[in-house]
Amino acid sequence: MDIFESVDALRETVQRWRQAGLSIGFVPTMGNLHAGHLSLVEEARQKSDKVIVSIFVNPLQFGPNEDFDRYPRTFDADKVLLQQQQADAIFCPSVDEMYPNGHSQTRVIAPEKMTGILEGEKRPGHFNGVTTVVAKLFNIVQPDIAVFGQKDFQQFAVLQQMVDDLAIPVSLVRAPIIRDETGLALSSRNQYLTDVQRRVAPKLYVALQAVEMAVQSGNRNYEALCQVASQQIMSDGFDFVDYVEILNATSLEKAQDNDRELIIVAAAKLGQTRLLDNILVNL
């Protein structure tokens, strides 16, 4: 497995692979890898000849009061996991390598209609940081496919819109959420949970499953279902519910009665840890 810290070195290898007629899969990450990330690598391996995984904690997508400085950097452990998963290369640039002009570089602005809600509403500017870094990574790696996890559903929808709008020649793959034995969606931030909080955390998914069951049974009073779910999450022991929403899975607009693919999304806090989860619903 090759490890690259510079853009030029990675591009030389990618060019050789291209000349050999090999297809390239790409998995962008911020490191601190877990089984959810590794499932994305496996998905990329099944769909391409060579797999590149980036590890880069992107400062542009963190707000001033967020956890950029304390975000876990676990490169040595990540490298072992990626070797076991048979990734072909790691791209682990420094902040200066990615942003040689500091924060005064060109930005890719995320579509406002998709980012003024949910995570974008709670984290202003976050998605502009995401679209900027992912567009740059796509230009560096030039993959055939890029694999993202469903857990960050809004992110995937925003990036798909960016790829469509800017005619970026990469196919995005949305891989399903990986959960632990309790049903909790895997996340790097789960390590911040106390033992007591870990017993509460899976109830977020349980509340979303109840909404899914109601929708599949024909209940279209989406606003009321979300209110009930929020109340249930709070009564289950969460400290705060940021949102529970039922949206059109493509546009992220409020779901309508005639929509056939929905996404039930939620974010809630246990102590200082924000948990995200979602369920796709096909009617």
Image: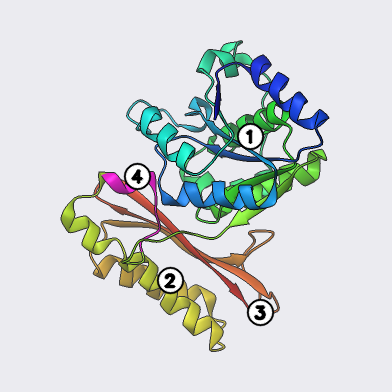
Q: Which residue is mark 3?
A: 257
Q: Which residues are magenta?
A: 184-191
Q: Which residue is mark 1?
A: 134
Q: Which residue is mark 2?
A: 208
Q: Which residue is mark 4?
A: 189
The location of residue 267, given as percent across then percent down, is 41, 56
* C-alpha separation, residue under disc 3 versus residue under disc 1: 34 Å
The reply to whether residue 244 is visible in this rendering is: yes
Q: Secondary structure at mark 1?
A: helix
* C-alpha separation, residue under disc 2 versus residue under disc 3: 19 Å
Residue for point 22% across, 63% down: 199
Task: Give amino acid for label 1.
Answer: Val
Instruction: State left or right for residue 168 relative to residue 249.
Output: right
Marker count (numbered): 4
Frontmost residue, 196 versus 19: 19
Task: Give amino acid for label 4.
Answer: Arg
Q: Nearer the viewer, mark 3 or mark 4?
A: 4
Say which quarter of the image contains residue 97: top right
Q: Nearer the viewer, mark 2 or mark 3?
A: 2
The location of residue 91, given as percent across then percent down, is 56, 26
* C-alpha separation, residue under disc 4 versus residue under disc 2: 20 Å
Position of the N terminus, as image quadrant, is top right
Few, some or many residues within 10 Å of mark 1 (<14, 14–19, 20+): some
Q: Nearer the viewer, mark 1 or mark 2?
A: 1
Residue for point 72% across, 42% down: 162
Question: Is residue 215 magenta-colored?
Answer: no
